[in-house]
Amino acid sequence: METTWIKDPLAIFTATMKDNGAAQSVQGGIVIQGSRILETLARGERPSVPIDVIVDASQHVVTPGLINAHHHFYQTLTRAYPEALNKELFHWLKSLYPVWAGLDEEMMRVATELALVEMMMSGCTTASDHHYLLPHGLEKAIDIQVDAAQQLGIRAILTRGSMSLGEEQGGLPPQHTIQHEDAIIDDSLRLIREYHQADDGAMVQIALAPCSPFSVTTELMKETALVARQHGVMLHTHLCETKDEEQFCLKRFGYRPVDYLEEVGWLHERTWLAHGIHFNDEEIRRLGQAQVGICHCPTSNMMLASGICRNKELEAAGAKVGIGVDGSASNDGSNMIAEVRMAMYLQRLRYGSAEVTHFDALRWATAGSAAAMGRNDIGKIKAGMQADIAMFKLDDIRFSGSHDPLAALLLCGAQQADRVMVAGKWRVVDGRVQGVDLDDLMARHSAAAKRLAMKAR
């Protein structure tokens, strides 16, 4: 196994401590052997083993690979879509459902590729996607995503989403976008059987993800929880994103969303939720006690004016808080390092500038996201962990005059990683994803976006 020394970084964030001691204590660098971190070194310390490759990191800020805990890759095809502008969640969704119903396999492939490449370029090493829209002809959407992730070499946690509650049954989605529940469960079992890796260092994992309380039935939520428990996979859904959702749950089920979550068998440590904004104090206590994961999606929440997640109370209660970019039609980007900055600033707006640090935001985007999605082998720079590393240069004009390199990464607004390693292999070098013709990818993606829009008209 090749042994690599990432030597003498400008600054390093390990995600093993909250204070600056962690950033200073391992500035001799990181030794990687095969797919794992072998050891971390103090300044001036030498590796304990022979080194095959030395990477000079003296101009780099180094972090664990960023981990995206919630996305909708297909939505990269409807960024800044005219009919969806300036709307809140329910109206925004209803304007886009008919467009997304036109997705085909070619569109799904190129949307997935572009979202993954964009995230890798921004320092992401593990990407989760929540794909719940499977119209006729797109039944193999998750298979397409698995193949794209494997081709690019990024770690992926892909959630088999679903919608079964159409407008005729009182749900939000149009009738032609939903699936029969037997088909959903059968396909969930197939995907687990064919692709889910349960071992340490897994590159592909499957989770089960009914879209939301307003798009699936209670029966599907319960059956999905049973399947997930039997097969040892995680559960994921949108919850408490808006007040509209709260009113929907009260009217249809007679429960607030967290009560509904418990009723359907989801209130436990194998569940992570997207958004999680509108919890009351008692619900936060229960979520923390159950060790539920919460994915904070700051840009999307600002764009749709949904509200601000209560990260600090959730963490204090015992919930596992991570970060996600959310779909590229409510974020209009898939940039993870930019999302970390947004998370820091939005949380400061809630708690005050002295209460939320760059260490907090980086922790949420690494160890926090990993824990929320049930992973304990990624998200930290520590001996024995998977060698998922992001390296950022501070040579752009935006960093000129900065003094604390790690703080500058967020405060000055880093946009792109220089190098990214996944499982010990360099996947981004000099800012370029290896093996990807970016101009060709963007041309194919743009053409697919135009074709999707034409189908909607």
Image (spheres, rainbow, N blue to C red):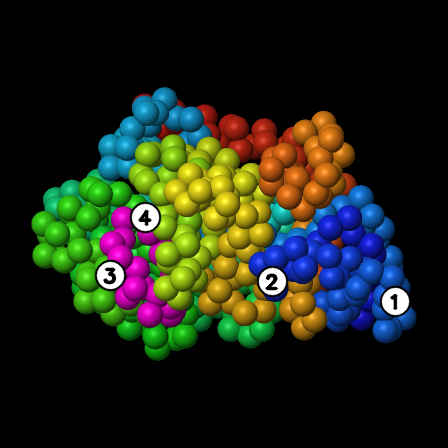
Residue at position x 85%, y 68% in the image: 47
Residue at position x 61%, y 64% in the image: 16
Residue that mark 3 sits on = 282
Residue that mark 4 sits on = 277
The image quadrant of residue 307 is top left
> Mark 2 or mark 3: which comes first in sequence?
2
As measured in the structure, the alpha-carbon distance from the residue carrying label 4 to the one carrying label 2 is 26 Å
The stretch in magenta equals: 269-292
Tell me, yes or no, whether the two marked residues, 3 and 4, touch with CB atoms within 8 Å.
Answer: no
The answer to whether residue 155 is visible is: no
Mark 4 vs mark 2, foreground winner is 2
The answer to whether residue 18 is visible is: yes
Q: Secondary structure at mark 3?
A: helix
Residue that mark 1 sits on = 46
Residue 62 versus residue 346 in the image, above or below: below
Q: Does the stretch in magenta take in 279?
A: yes
Mark 1 vs mark 3, foreground winner is 3
x%, y% of residue 216? 22, 54
Question: Crowdedness of circle 3 by 10 Å Cα count: few (<14), some, many (20+)?
Answer: few
As measured in the structure, the alpha-carbon distance from the residue carrying label 3 to the one carrying label 4 is 14 Å
Residue that mark 2 sits on = 17
- Residue that sits furthest to the bottom in the current view: 230
